[in-house]
Image: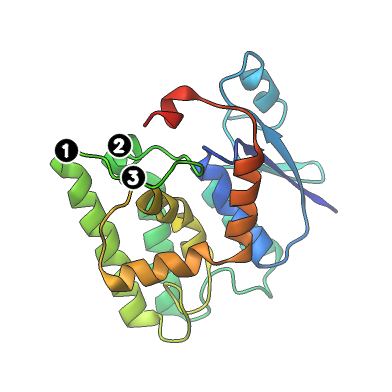
Amino acid sequence: MSLTLILANKAYSSWSLRPFILMRHFGIPFSETVIPLAQETTRADILRHSPSGKLPALRDGDLVVWDSLAIIEYLAERFPDLPIWPRDKRARATARSLAAEMHSGFPALRTNFPMNMRRPVRAREDLPPEVWAEVKRMEGAWVDARQKFGAGGNFLFGEFSAADAMFAPVVNRFHVYDVEVGKPARAYMEAIMALAAYRGWLKGAQAETWRIEKYELA
């Protein structure tokens, strides 16, 4: 059966980027439907696809899977021959821990660096200290994973995996908000941004005509 990925605006939806970049990178065929946010019909449009009223959602025949991490886990089961999670048990456990931490954590970072793929690169000033504590934690997690498991490639666990998909939106945030990180973290960011799947998402975001001013002005 064919897969359909239902997404919110590519410019603003960090959650939607995650399954998109993973599916594109691993060559999983799918069609996509983009539902713009902050429109009069947005909630009704989303509810036609996702029972939670949130995106992304994945339709596989008459099955609907919602939430980015749940979609990734479903795809890992649906396509077991693909290395969506690292094959090594220890690396896989660490990758899942990092993905879960990203999924549920970093509230200050999310609030102060709202997602906007089209944002010109410029730093923000007068950020609260909890933002920098979360930046330090994230950078440390990236460097630690690269040191322990990343020798075989340019990503957290060597080759691109679900963990990288989960962090791809933060890579964009760190880039467009000009967050200062060390050379190892910056090299990892450059590897993510060089991916064809990432560039394809960025091209789609730049082509969108919908605008939400609070994100454009952040």
Q: CA distance from mark 2 to mark 3?
A: 13 Å
Residue at 47% over, 23% down: 213
Residue 208 figure quarter: top right
Crowding around mark 2 (Cα neighbors within 10 Å: few <14, some 14 to 19, many 20+) is: some
User: From the viewer's perspective, is residue 184 above or below residue 211?
Assistant: below
Q: Hey, which residue is sitting farthest bottom in the picture? A: 152
Outermost residue, right side: 1
Crowd class of label 3 (few under 14; some 14 to 19; many from 20; radius 10 Å): few
Is residue 156 toward the left or the right of residue 132 in the image?
right
Question: Which residue is label 3 attached to?
Answer: 122
Residue 155, horizontal then vertical, whole percent: 45, 73
**Residue 71 visible, this orientation:** no
Q: Where residue 51 appears, x then y in whole percent?
A: 63, 29
Please, what secondary structure does the residue beneath circle 1 have? loop
Q: Is residue 199 above or below residue 188?
A: above
| Pick the front one: 84 or 186 | 186
Place of residue 38 in the rendered image (x, y in percent of width and height, measured from the top left): 56, 21
Instruction: Say which residue label 1 marks.
Output: 128
Three-letter amino acid code at the position of disc 3: Arg
Q: Secondary structure at mark 2?
A: helix
Quarter in which the C terminus is drawn: top left
Marks 1 and 3 close (CB-CB < 8 Å) = no
Q: Is residue 186 above or below residue 137?
A: below
Q: Residues within 10 Å of mark 1 (few under 14, many from 20)?
A: few
**Residue 112: mark:** 2
Residues tagged 2 and 1 counted as in contact (Cβ below 8 A): yes
What amino acid type should be assigned to the residue bearing mark 2? Asn
Image coordinates of residue 76 in percent, x first then y, are: 62, 64
Q: Is residue 125 left or right of residue 5?
A: left
Depth check: give the residue in front, 70 or 7: 7
Tell me, for residue 148, which label it has, or none.
none
